[in-house]
Amino acid sequence: MSAPQQPVGTRVTQRRYVTYSHAHYAGNLVDGAYGLGLFGDVATELCILTDGDEGLFASYDDVQFRAPVRAGDVVEATAELVKAGRRSRVMAFTLTVVARGAATPERPGAAALLDPPLVATTATGTVVVP
């Protein structure tokens, strides 16, 4: 397809629980690559929605790690189509923490919704489609 079937501004969002197996650092911190992997997933979904193809990630631009992601968090990864060329698709990405573990000795499974959600990572990227 030579042009996207969905307009600029089309968005997709996926939500994930960050398991403790993803913690790599003290304080149950998760590395930034975790969020970039989620950006790849939402980019794929957006390409399928707009072009009927998974597409191929070409590059990231302006990746910003703004806040920590921790094991026990619930995160949302969002991709928005911001520019469509003949074969290229530029997308804006946001990773937000919508809930965070709040364990105590009395309640080891406690968690809380974050209001407002915490913006953890932002980026732009380019995907190509056939």
Image (spheres, helix red, strand yellow):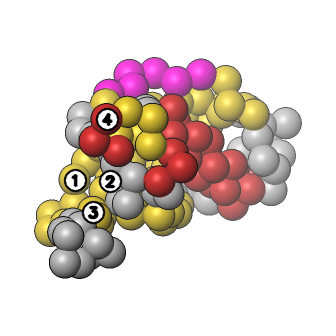
Q: CA distance from mark 3 to mark 1?
A: 10 Å
Kind of element beneath mark 4: helix
Left or right, 26 with respect to 90, comes to left
Question: Would you name the residue on which mark 4 appears?
Answer: 26
Q: CA distance from mark 3 to mark 4?
A: 16 Å
Q: CA distance from mark 2 to mark 4?
A: 21 Å
The answer to whether residue 21 is above or below residue 123 is: below
* Residue neighbourhood size for the residue with mark 2, other residues' Cα within 10 Å, grouped as few (<14), some (14–19), many (≥20): many
Question: Would you name the residue on which mark 2 appears?
Answer: 96
Question: Would you name the residue on which mark 1 appears?
Answer: 118
* CB-based contact (under 8 Å), mark 3 and mark 1: yes
Checking the image for residue 22, the label placed there is none
The residue mark sitting in front, 3 or 4, is 4
* CB-based contact (under 8 Å), mark 3 and mark 4: no
Q: Position of residue 60 (x, y in %)?
A: 52, 24
Q: Position of residue 16 (x, y in %)?
A: 50, 63
Magenta residues, dominant SS class: strand
The residue mark sitting in front, 4 or 1, is 4
Identify residue type, mark 3: Arg
The answer to whether residue 121 is above or below residue 95 is: above
> Residue at left 50%, top 57%?
19
Q: CA distance from mark 2 to mark 3?
A: 11 Å
Q: CA distance from mark 2 to mark 1?
A: 5 Å
Identify residue type, mark 2: Thr
For the C terminus, the quadrant is top right
Kind of element beneath mark 2: strand
* Residue neighbourhood size for the residue with mark 3, other residues' Cα within 10 Å, grouped as few (<14), some (14–19), many (≥20): many
* Residue neighbourhood size for the residue with mark 1, other residues' Cα within 10 Å, grouped as few (<14), some (14–19), many (≥20): some
